[in-house]
Amino acid sequence: MRSLDAILPFPPSVNSYYRHVGFKVLISRDGRKYRKMVVSRLAGTRPLEGRLSLTALLYPKDRRRRDADNTLKCLLDSLAHAGTMHDDSQIKVLHVEMREPDGDARVEVHLEEIE
């Protein structure tokens, strides 16, 4: 079974990931910027196949209150856009931990194929 380990920038919250323009819902400038960074860091990655398990260790930049689940939409969409998987619906097991800040805002990702 194949897997992928990556250290990525801390993702923007889902609260700032989308923008409403009239009746349209668009990915915000911050969301597009984040997705572009993830794509460039994971360039050349072959997509994982089948059912996937994702572990995400979140290290925020500071101690402000954050909901761990609010970071997932942008992270998962960006990973899919980078070609690590065909679609984020492949993720069947999800483990997320919000860790204490340590001066280096990031998310440590482990994505693997499962049976």
Image (cartoon, rainbow, N blue to C red):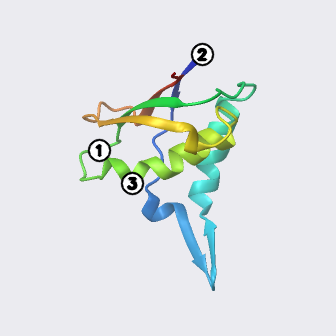
Which residue is at 33% across, 47% downward?
A: 68
The label nearer to you, 1 versus 3, is 3
- The quarter of the displayed image where residue 13 is located: bottom left
Report the disc number at residue 70: 3
First reached walking from the N terminus: tag 2 or tag 3: 2
C-alpha distance separating marks 2 and 3: 27 Å
Of the pair 16 and 109, the residue shown nearer to us: 109
First reached walking from the N terminus: tag 1 or tag 3: 1
Q: Is residue 64 left or right of residue 59?
A: left
Instruction: Give the answer, above or below, for where 8 lies relative to 70.
Output: above
Read off the residue under disc 1: 62
**Is mark 1 in CB contact (under 8 Å) with mark 2?**
no
Name the amino acid type tagged 3.
Asn
C-alpha distance separating marks 1 and 2: 34 Å
Question: Which residue is most to the bottom?
Answer: 22
Q: Sort mark 1 into few (<14), some (14-19) or many (20+) by Cα contacts within 10 Å.
A: few
Read off the residue under disc 2: 2
- The quarter of the displayed image where residue 31 is located: bottom right
The label nearer to you, 2 versus 3, is 2
Which residue is at 49% across, 52% downward?
A: 73
Residue 98 pos. (x, y %): 29, 38
Instruction: Give the answer, above or below, for where 111 lies relative to 75.
Output: above
Looking at the rendering, in which quadrant would you find the N terminus? top right
Residue 57 pos. (x, y %): 37, 31
Q: Secondary structure at mark 2?
A: loop
Residue 43 pos. (x, y %): 73, 29
